[in-house]
Image (cartoon, grey):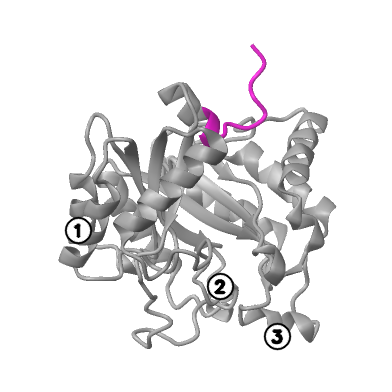
Amino acid sequence: MTPKPINYFHDHLIECYGQRVQKLCLDGGFTCPNRDGSKSFGGCLFCDSDGSGAGKILAARPVGEQVARQKALCQRRYGAKLFIAYFQAFTNTYAPVERLRFLYDQALASDDVIGLSVGTRADCLDEQVCDLLASYMSRSRRVWVEIGVQTVNQATLDRMNRAEGVEDFRRAAQLVKQRNLELVVHVIVGLPGDGIDDFLATVDFVNTLNADGIKIHNLYVDSRAPLAALWRKGDVPILSFGDYVSAVAQGVARLSSRCLVHRLSGQAPKPYHLAPEWALDKNRVIRAVEAELLARGAFHGSLYSPPASAGG
């Protein structure tokens, strides 16, 4: 049997549940430690004023109401019957544990919500939070923890006002995996100061963590993000479509085949998207990466080399 060019998360869900599983993007009213002054102000330079969320359509409403409204929408639009509660905007473990429990309980109140996915920062995960997240796991419910490493180039992270380090991420990833939570890593290709070698080194780092999933994003410019001002001055180079496709194909070939691909590109909401224009056509990116892998005689994991630290 010919290996699939890419092992996608959405295909995995269909294989597991026999039907489409739809994410419900939720806003729990969080902020970030590099926005409120705990570590820095202004947030990461690439992050928009909504905290890279899905927009503020339902923000400020109770989480239970957000879930009900989005479920109804997804049922009408996609015919979906199973859902994952996805806390997406800002840092979704940045609160006392009791507050987190209150919000997560609301999101998981019905049996058709078969999973919880929480986007957060490495420096906002500790043993108490991971224990809480693990408490939601059962035979019928899964929990994913999504953490942005973005790049292993610490100098680039510092320029982006990330206000945390690669070792913070390694520590947090270990906490997640120790509790059998599913680890999803976010990386960005083309950050200012990064080259393709930095992205490939980041993929190699992800492999050492035994990650369950990855979200690969191109650097894009959102008009609401601090990066926009630098881009307008010409200080933020943007990868061409061809260079991005080539880089991602190389990265996917090096990525462990058990690390499912959740995303291959990113974009801002269209009214705020400044660059690159090609990122607005997600399907074109997917087709091009798959075609590039085929042209190279490669596929997901074909160039994977088990890291010594991961024991193979």
From the image, tell me which residue sits under label 3. Answer: 229
Quarter residue 30 falls in:
bottom left
Residue 8 coordinates in the image, percent (x, y)? 57, 34
From the image, tell me which residue sits under label 1. Answer: 101
> Disc 2 versus disc 1: distance between alpha carbons?
26 Å
Q: In this view, does 113 lie to the left or right of 96?
A: right
Please rate how many residues cluster around mark 1, counting C-alpha atoms within 10 Å: few if below 14, some from 14 to 19, many from 20: some
Q: Is residue 268 above or below residue 205?
A: below
Q: Is residue 207 visible in this depiction of the protein?
A: no
> Disc 2 versus disc 3: distance between alpha carbons?
13 Å
Q: In this view, does 51 lie to the left or right of 101?
A: right
Q: In this view, does 205 lie to the left or right of 137?
A: right
Q: Is residue 228 above or below residue 270?
A: below
Please, what is the dominant secondary structure of the magenta stretch? loop
Secondary element type, mark 3: helix
Magenta part of the chain: 1-11
> Disc 3 versus disc 1: distance between alpha carbons?
38 Å
Please, what is the three-letter code of the amino acid marked with disc 3? Ala
Quadrant position of the C terminus in the picture: top left
Please, what is the three-letter code of the amino acid marked with disc 2? Cys
Along the viewing direction, whichever of 123 and 24 lies nearer the viewer: 24
Residue under the point 42% across and 68% down: 59
- Dot 2 and dot 1 residues touching (CB under 8 Å): no
| Viewer-side label of 3, 1 | 1
Magenta segment includes 3: yes
Residue under the point 74% across and 76% down: 236
Please rate how many residues cluster around mark 3, counting C-alpha atoms within 10 Å: few if below 14, some from 14 to 19, many from 20: some
Quadrant position of the N terminus in the picture: top right
Q: Is residue 274 above or below residue 196?
A: below
Residue 193 coordinates in the image, percent (x, y)? 68, 72
